[in-house]
Image (tube, grey):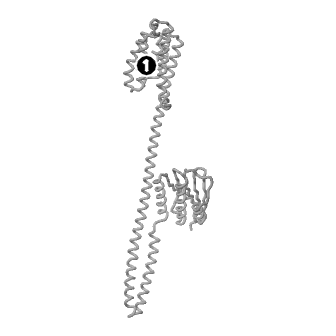
Amino acid sequence: MNERLKNNYFVVVRLALMLILSVSGFIGMYMKNEKIIMDKTGVSLEILLLVSLYIGLMSVKEICSLKVKRIILIPAVLLYLMIFKIGGDSFILLGFFTSYEILTLFPRVSFVWYILLIFMAFIPVSVDFMTRFLVALLLSTIYVQHEFIVSSYQKRMMEDLVLEQGLKRDMRDREHAAKAEVRRSILQAENQILEERAALSQTLHDKLGHNINGSIYQLEGVKILMEKDPEKSRSMIQAVIDQLRTGMDEIRAILRKERPKKNEYAMVQLYKLCEDSNNKGVETELSIDGDTAVIPDDIWEIILDNTYEAVSNSMKYAKCKQIDIKIIVMNKMIRCLVSDDGIGCKSVEDGMGIAGMRQRIRTVGGTVSFETEAGFTVNMLIPLPESE
């Protein structure tokens, strides 16, 4: 209700002015003691009816469109002229009000016209000049303030509101695009890993399958020749051993060459962790700064284990709505932060989860600290091994 009153304050002000000026007309008539109002009721029912109709039309006008307002104002002006004719110049102040109302129906009118209406106070009527002048000045001030100051401010606010909504819409679109890009990155990384696994399987089949099959055939031959020709059997067994040893060397070479990169696999796991948390209703974002390719595999394992532990604790105990995961790769250090906007805690107790995080970090010479004032933050600092 208060908000509606704020938005329509000028309507309330105008209706109040119209009622006050109408009452002042009746008071002026009574003070002049004119016969037109000195019947048994004290006020002529005729003029009272006309004023009531005038007020009703002017009130209805406020809820109509500009075109309809202009149409309604025609009978309202005619009613005022009848009021002025019957009631006399005691209703001149209501005429001032009617003149300002006419100007409001023409939005492009200059404010100079509102100022010029002050000169209506110089019309010679029975109402005191000072009263006429002060009422005209008050009406000019009120209408100019609304039509040229408040209205421009409201227009600017509306433009700012439209701009703000546009910015919010752009931010939502960018957020959706970013999430879609993350999903595409996850799918691309998963596809790459699957392709590498398929290539690895094919390579093992091509390289190792023939080797093993040949060895099996030779061992079958050894089984037959073992009693008839022991010397040749020993030679064939040695050939099988050499062939299998060569095969093992090839397997090691293939695995070193074809296995997926740890950092790519770790990124997929982190993105999946974020996606799982988002699906559970907690907005989780991952941001990375620096070259993650320099992080060794053993440190990736620690980062993944501790991040999973931290996110799990936030989901269980923090009652949070958002979790942020940040990995910052510097020259000689890696900083990993997992923070939430939950209830936090007064002190950190080393349960199995926290103790495990400390132990894992300690094995690589790093440190872990906790911030509990605004939400809960796990801050990990891990030194990078010096490159040879």
x, y (%) of residue 266?
Answer: 49, 62
Name the quadrant containing residue 83. top left
Could you tell me if residue 325 is visible in this image?
no
x, y (%) of residue 260?
Answer: 45, 66
Closer-to-camera residue (27/138): 27
Q: Which residue occupies 41% across, 26% down?
A: 63
Q: Which residue lies furthest to the front in this view?
A: 40
Q: Quadrant of the C terminus?
A: bottom right
x, y (%) of residue 135?
Answer: 51, 16
Could you tell me if residue 140 is visible in this image?
yes
Which residue lies under the disc numbered 1?
A: 55
Does 328 appear above or below 43?
below
Q: Which residue occupies 44% across, 18% down?
A: 98
Dot 1 amino acid type: Ile
x, y (%) of residue 191?
Answer: 41, 62
Q: Which residue lies furthest to the top in this view?
A: 35
Closer-to-camera residue (49/118): 49
Crowding near the residue tagged with mark 1, few <14, some 14–19, many ≥20 C-alpha atoms within 10 Å: some
